[in-house]
Amino acid sequence: MALQRSTLEAFLKRTWAQRGLAAWLLWPLSCIFGALSAWRRLLYRLGIAKTQRLPVPVVVVGNIFVGGTGKTPLTIWLAQALRQAGLHPGVISRGYGTHNDVPHAVTAQSLAQQVGDEPLLIAYRTQCPVMVGRDRVAVAQALLAAHPEVDVIISDDGLQHYRLARDIEIILFDGRGVGNGWLLPAGPLREPVSRRRDFTVINGAPESMLLPPDAIAMRLEGLVAEPLAMMPYAQASSRTLASFSVAPTRILAAAGIGNPQRFFTLLRAAGLDFAELPLPDHYDFSDNPFAGLHADVILITEKDAVKCRQNDALRNDPRFWVVPVTAHLDGALAEQIVEKLRGHSIA
């Protein structure tokens, strides 16, 4: 099953990168998909399908490119920026791979398979109220009922959840840009590039020139690692990534994220030489993918760490080190978002 999924992902990656034969053969289906999506958006725009407005403003952080583009680090950055501005943000999310038909609060004791790995990481890093569930309107209402101090909701993903009225939309791209620029299944886009939004953020240098010139650059930085057994992290136990480069240390880097190569590139920029173990996005670590692999140090992402920490076979293995990643953006973006939330026009 894993091999079949890997083969399909490789095929789609090649197909979506350019307008080759496979993409052209799928293009008629993309036209149907685009027409259905446009019809659904029109129903909400005309008021035929009803939106639900909350008593506090809503900021949606999402992408139209299928797969990971770095939404979680951006959501964490935004929550921290809003707190620094004196606001009290709460975060809602679908919770990938979960089956929460009713809202479910995320706490330090939550299991990743119950609430999702990304919401659990967001709760760790931001210390903000986080709640997950299938219906984002119901989830947001439940969060506000449980935490009346919350004065702004951040929706982690949910651009296409039109029933939830939103005040600000932030669309994130990564270095893949818009791929071949076509909608699913001929291309990687859920919606057209022309889709309205308030802000466009690019994680890394884009390969496509179809993105707006006023897009805001986001840079991910990871300079240290923390022992997995010490999560939540303790600064006193951290080591710089460069300290792992001393020979003959055998290093293995593993990443179960949407774009594992992004993590590997970050580590190589720190001067590390290592073996790669890319894993499927949201890999649950119910089995041990490291069995039989020889390494003195295993570097993993924060997203994987919240699941490995809940695995008895992995949690106390001293070889595991977590690389926290921090998003860096122009501070003016936070100022513009806060200004817009407070009802002022953006200069």
Image (tube, grey):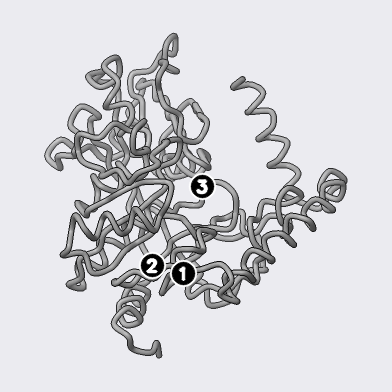
- Quarter of the picture containing the N terminus is top right
Q: Which mark is residue 59?
A: 2
**What kind of residue is marked 1?**
Glu
State which tag comes first along the sequence, 1 or 2. 2
Where is 51 relative to 326, above or below?
below
- Near mark 2 (Cα within 10 A), the count class, few <14, some 14-19 or many ≥20, is many
Q: Is residue 177 left or right of residue 136?
A: right
> Is 7 positioned to the left or the right of 2 in the image?
right
Contact check, label 1 and label 2, Cβ < 8 Å: yes
Write the residue at 44% across / 9% down.
292
Looking at the image, residue 322 lies above or below residue 61: above
Instruction: Specify the quadrant of the image occupied by residue 300.
Output: top left
Is residue 42 rendered to the left or right of residue 165?
A: right
Categorize mark 3 by other alpha carbons within 10 Å: few (<14), some (14-19), many (20+). Answer: some
Q: Which residue is mark 3?
A: 68
The answer to which of marks 2 and 3 sits earlier in the sequence is: 2
Image point 17% across, 63% down: which residue? 148
| Quadrant that contains the C terminus | bottom left
Could you say where residue 168 lies in the image, as x and y percent from the top left? 42, 73
> Residue 106: percent from the left, percent from the top?
26, 43
Which residue is denoted by mark 1 in the rendering?
169
Report helix, strand or loop for mark 3: loop
